[in-house]
Amino acid sequence: MNPCTVVSVGDTASGVVAGLAAFPHAVHVVRQCPALDELLAACQSGLAQVAVVADYAEELTATLIDRLTAVGVSVVAIASTEEGFSRLKGIGAHPVGAGASPELLVEVVRAAVEGRRHPGSAGFAVPAAPEPGDSTSMTDDAGTPPSPRGGAFSGSGTGDGGGTGDGGGASGGEGSGTNAAWGSRAKAASATGIAGAARTAGTLVAVWGPIGSPGRTTLAINLAAEQAAAGRTVMVIDADSYGASIAASLGLLEESASFAQACRAADQGTLTAARLAATATRVVFKGGTLLLLTGLTRADRWPELRAAAVERVLQLARESVDLVVVDCGFALENDEELSYDTVAPRRNAATLKVLAQADLVFAVGSGDPLGIPRLIRGMDELAKHCPAAEVRVVVNKVRRKAVGGPPEKSLAQAWERFAPGHGISHFLPWDHELTDQALLEGKLLLEVNPDAALRRAIRGISCAEGQRN
């Protein structure tokens, strides 16, 4: 068996990295780098299969590890503390304790490589390295290094999953209907709101639509509200990196970009269920409660939404609630990262990552001569980014004056002619007076007029996969 190729940076006081030289049949250290940036450059050039990080481990982030993983390099990091061990495990590294022996480090390196070659085989999973403070991570009195503990290594470990409460402890009221009054409806969720016992993962629903304001935000927040009113625990995330608008639509005056806050914590490996609960805003409305991660306050803050961090936030959100509804941006292009040899952010990373992780995608378009062609053109590109998700087409703002004749029949015929094989799942009627009033008052449709046709149409949309209404 060929030895694994390794690049390293730094060493421990006991010289565990230098000790790899005693195992040339198993590991070949091709370069010892003086700094983390040189190690990253060596990995980008394809010199090694594994990066062993002893120094600068505290500077590793989920984004860096995700980038190295993308070029075929696994990261083995040496943690000096128990907290550091947990953090490194949470961002996707393979951590070992500072007291580990060279033999154990060799095993972890070899298992990391085999795990990449055979990702579906538990037999090649990285062993669970002893954590700092564990007596098994040190040599025994005779100086014999212990065997590593058995079991598969888990590289995610983002925190404890939990279910949301029913909102009974949330402060705030229904408000008087003005934007100012709505400020009292949004309070930081308590740490016990979504932290709790382990639970099965919830459903991730993405709401996407092409450029032109087809109604993504209106559908996302009202669909989430209907599900919350039906008794499900729901979190809404504003992931639009171009024009986040959920907070303004709900009349929240003190917007703090909590989605970006959660992403920063996830990138550093410090995001837990309790911290996500404290970061989210609890919105209490007539009929229920939902949690909200607000979007960017300025469009130029988009580099804060890194793909690796977004993925970890989504994972933890799904472990915490029954349903996660994400309002996505319109753009689907793979952009800046393709033009760089180093780690570079992508403007559309949040949208693309959400679509890749989604269980169900609602593709929203305006029911007019501009909106329908835009939606049709976007459907092919959308399918490339969410091949595993069920996609349902929702035509919004349906009205006779825009298409002529019976609007639903005309739109269905046009859609079948230009986009065969993928029918329209839902039609939402045009009701600008209702939506204008809801926006002015910072309310949801079910609060403004529960009997309105638009509200009833959204209530009839199911968030369960494989169901059509």
Image (spheres, helix red, strand yellow):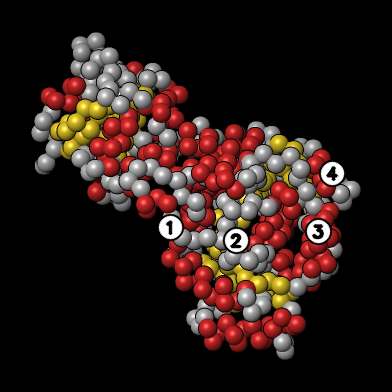
Tell me the residue that label 4 is attached to.
Answer: 180
User: Mark 3 Cα within 10 Å, few/some/many (few <14, many 20+)?
Assistant: many
First-in-chain label (1 vs 2): 2
Residue at horizontal 13 percent and vertical 38 percent from the top: 3
The disc labelled 3 sits on which kind of residue? Ala
Kind of element beneath mark 1: loop
First-in-chain label (3 vs 2): 2
Mark identifier at residue 207: 2
Q: Nearer the viewer, mark 1 or mark 2?
A: 1
Residue 386 locus on image (x, y percent): 46, 62
Q: In the picture shown, does residue 82 fall above or below 48?
A: above
State which quarter of the image contains the N terminus: top left
Tell me the residue that label 3 is attached to.
Answer: 438
Judge from the rendering whether residue 302 lies leftward or rightward of residue 121; answer left or right: right
Mark identifier at residue 334: 1
Residue 36 locus on image (x, y percent): 32, 29
Examine the rendering and report whether any part of residue 137 can be seen: no
The disc labelled 1 sits on which kind of residue? Asn
Residue 64 locus on image (x, y percent): 39, 38
C-beta proximity under 8 Å, tags 1 and 3 = no
